[in-house]
Amino acid sequence: MTEATALWITGRDQADIRAAEMGQGSRVETLFTGISRGTERLVSSGKIPASEYDRMRAPFQQGDFPFPVKYGYANVGRATEGAHAGRHVFALFPHQDIFRLPDDALIPLPSELPPERAVLAANMETALNILWDSGAGAGDRITVIGAGLVGLLVAHLAARLPGAEVTIIDTQATRAGIATQMGAAFAAPDQAADEQDVVINTSASQAGLVQALSLAAPQATVTEASWHGSTQVALPLGGAFHSRRLRIVSSQVGSVPVDRAPRWSLRRRLTKALDLLADDRLDHLISGETPFTKIAPAYPGILADPATVCHRIAY
């Protein structure tokens, strides 16, 4: 039997290539996986609260939190068996060279989508759900705080709303060019415009959420799309929070708004996410690539590097 190998997070900021279970179903040979820096950094640093161990399991995770765990959910490969044999497919599977899954867990890529870009699918699905949760509509003034991968994808989608005015705020001025590619304006935190109809925080920082409240117009909604792990966040709810009747709404990709839940299955959402990736501008979100055989020693540095947007692993 062919033995699979995978990237394992073996301890705090430590990784190794180890044997892994193949699973059951049709065989897939991995071509690329994408590192979801925000979540994987929390996993690697041991900041998943014990209360969230079950909810934060990746769909096909092996091992248990805190360590060692085989973690990840952005896998693009070629199916060699089953209903999708010969096709490129996306799966919510960790960083592993070969694996097996049931056919219904494999989603074929659209013919026009390069497999190199398809590693963004899970994050695009997250961005789509965030936009739904925010209630953003045509003509709105929309600010996204945090120019990480998810924030940039949210801005990319929001900028397609007719007449929407979209701004990305980030402390890294180097992200301005990428923001422009996504169709949004860029501003440093001290340049941000207030009176926004919709504010979305993807910065995973207390400062970002505090600023989001300060930018929201009366009766506007602030969508908190960051997951802070075990970090405690303090908010200034004295000030104008009540008099301006602001709302804070959480967004979590594990569930969708109640008015969409009966119709939008996970498979439908991921299929739509793949369709939405058919845009060459999104290649700007790939900030680097490392061969799978060399990823273990490089992994902690990739997660720690603030310049990382989406780092791709090539198999």
Image (tube, rainbow, N blue to C red):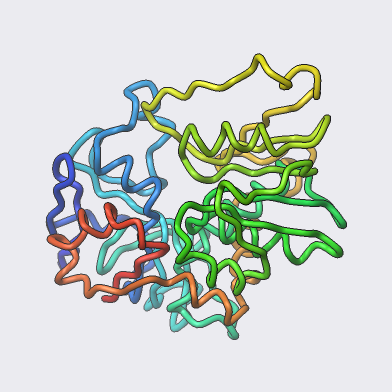
43 lies above or below 51: below
Q: Is residue 258 visible?
A: no
Seen in the image, is 175 located left or right of residue 2?
right
Name the image quarter holding residue 188.
Answer: bottom right
| Place of residue 251 in the rendered image (x, y in percent of width and height, measured from the top left) | 61, 38
Residue 82 relative to residue 3: left or right: right
Q: Is residue 38 left or right of residue 20?
A: right
Q: Residue 182 in the image: x percent, y percent?
A: 62, 69
Q: Residue furthest front?
A: 190
Q: Farthest top residue?
A: 238
The answer to whether one can see residue 110 in this image is yes
Q: Nearer the viewer, residue 101 or 19?
A: 19
Looking at the picture, how far across and down is residue 245, in whole percent?
Answer: 80, 22
Residue 21's quadrant in the figure? Answer: bottom left
Q: Is residue 17 left or right of residue 140?
A: left
Measured along the vertical axis of the image, is residue 243 above or below residue 71? above
The residue positioned 13% from the left and 59% from the top of the image is: 17
The N terminus lies in quadrant: bottom left
Residue 177 or 188: which is nearer the viewer? 188
The residue at the point 62 percent across, 78 percent down is 279
Name the residue at 60% across, 36% down.
Answer: 211
Q: Quadrant of the C terminus?
A: bottom left
Residue drawn at the location 27% of the way across and 52% of the way down: 304
